[in-house]
Image (cartoon, helix red, strand yellow):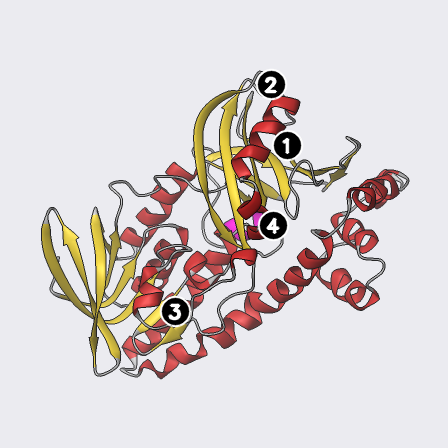
Amino acid sequence: MKKEYDIVVVGAGPAGSIAARYAAQRGASVLILEKDRDVGYPVRCGEAISREGLEAFIKPDKRWINAEITKFGFVAPNGKKVVINLGKVEGYMLERRIFDYELAKTASDAGAEILTRAYVNSLINENGKVTGVNFEFRGEQKQIKCKIVIGADGVESRVGRWAGLETHIDFRDMESCFQVTASNVECDQDTLFFYFGKEVAPEGYFWVFPKGKGTANIGLGVSGGIGKKRSALSYLNNNLENLFPTANILTQIAGGVPSVVALKVMAAHGIMLVGDAARQVNPLSGGGISSGMMGASIAGRLAARSIKNNDLVYIKNYHKEWKKLRGKKHDFLDKIKDGLFNFTDIQFNNLIESMLKLPEKKRTVGRFFMIALKNKPSLLKDIAKVFMV
């Protein structure tokens, strides 16, 4: 470990590893500092990712893919369900412990250095600019100087707050989530199931994602306003008792997911945020692996360009490029979320009934949302652009 690097990345999740890889591939010296002992652990994720979002950054490998997704299932409060056949593999269920590890290896192969159990506790600021980090490693305080710090330290992002970036989020926009990985579960291994309803997951949804024969990630997210009145765990326990009474719990995780659009300011003098730290999460689904990697690829590329040209002005283009690549879609998904999650149980039941009346070939994700938001004509054109109808 050197005393100075071009770039220090805080966090070795997917976004952190991709940012490091893209920067290192372009000649920057990069150090990743990960607070946990192992890259990829603990897992706080539903572990689903789109095929397109994954394959843009790494070739699929059976070692860390538990299931190939070819269908979406939507379940109404009255129990009726509609399954949408995507026609081909459009997503994967990951084994994040192995997946994150492999992503970190790609960063290492590109030239980045990685240090685990390195707990960053403050930033170095000089003349209003971030110039490095202070961290604890093996009981000792260390200091590393750098030209750019990339914060990939998750939704709580202390790095962002220390740098003075506005990372505050209204509690009502923070989904309260709880998930278990369970065995002895009967579920289709090629289908992601989403359940809706005020008794199941008000202002959110309950999910069942396959993880291999007899195993699944089962969880839910409810809005911060709901979670303040009744815990996500309480809703999850009820759902497990009603739907999967014989399930055996293998792991449990809880956390918050920012269901809003990305930060308006994701970079400043010597600092950039990526992934959950920058709110680069799909506001509708709460998924953030692929979008976080997309944001990180932009950040890593621009950071390396700034280093190469000895001009940090390039990082000012970060938000603009994010907006062009992903931001507009996220803005739109946020609008859909506001419309869909305020549905009554009757509206959800009617939505599923309308889908079931369609010929199977016409049951698409785009059609699902078009029916759901038929009373909001201003959104229909945008839906057609985003989803295949």
Instruction: Tell me which numbered mark, 3 or 2, is placed earlier along the sequence.
Output: 2
Residue 188 image offset from top left, x and y in percent: 65, 27
The residue identified by callout 1 is 190
Amino acid beneath label 1? Asp
Label 4 vs label 2: CA separation? 26 Å
Q: Residues within 10 Å of mark 1 (few under 14, many from 20)?
A: many
Q: Viewer-proximal residue, 219 or 72?
A: 219
The residue identified by callout 2 is 245
The residue identified by callout 3 is 301
> In the rendered structure, are the residues bearing label 3 and label 2 in contact, judged by CB atoms less than 8 Å apart?
no
Q: Is residue 152 above or below residue 197?
A: below
Q: Secondary structure at mark 1?
A: loop
Q: Is residue 226 left or right of residue 249?
A: right
Q: Secondary structure at mark 3?
A: helix
Q: Nearer the viewer, mark 3 or mark 2?
A: 2
Instruction: Tell me which numbered mark, 1 or 2, is placed earlier along the sequence.
Output: 1
Residue 328 image offset from top left, x and y in percent: 61, 69
Label 3 vs label 2: CA separation? 49 Å
Instruction: Tell me which numbered mark, 1 or 4, is placed earlier along the sequence.
Output: 1
Q: Residue 106 in magenta?
A: no
Q: Residue at x 63, y 46 (%)?
A: 204
Amino acid beneath label 2? Pro
Instruction: Tell me which numbered mark, 4 or 2, is placed earlier along the sequence.
Output: 2
The residue identified by callout 4 is 285
Amino acid beneath label 3? Arg
Label 1 vs label 4: CA separation? 18 Å
Segment colored magenta: 51-55
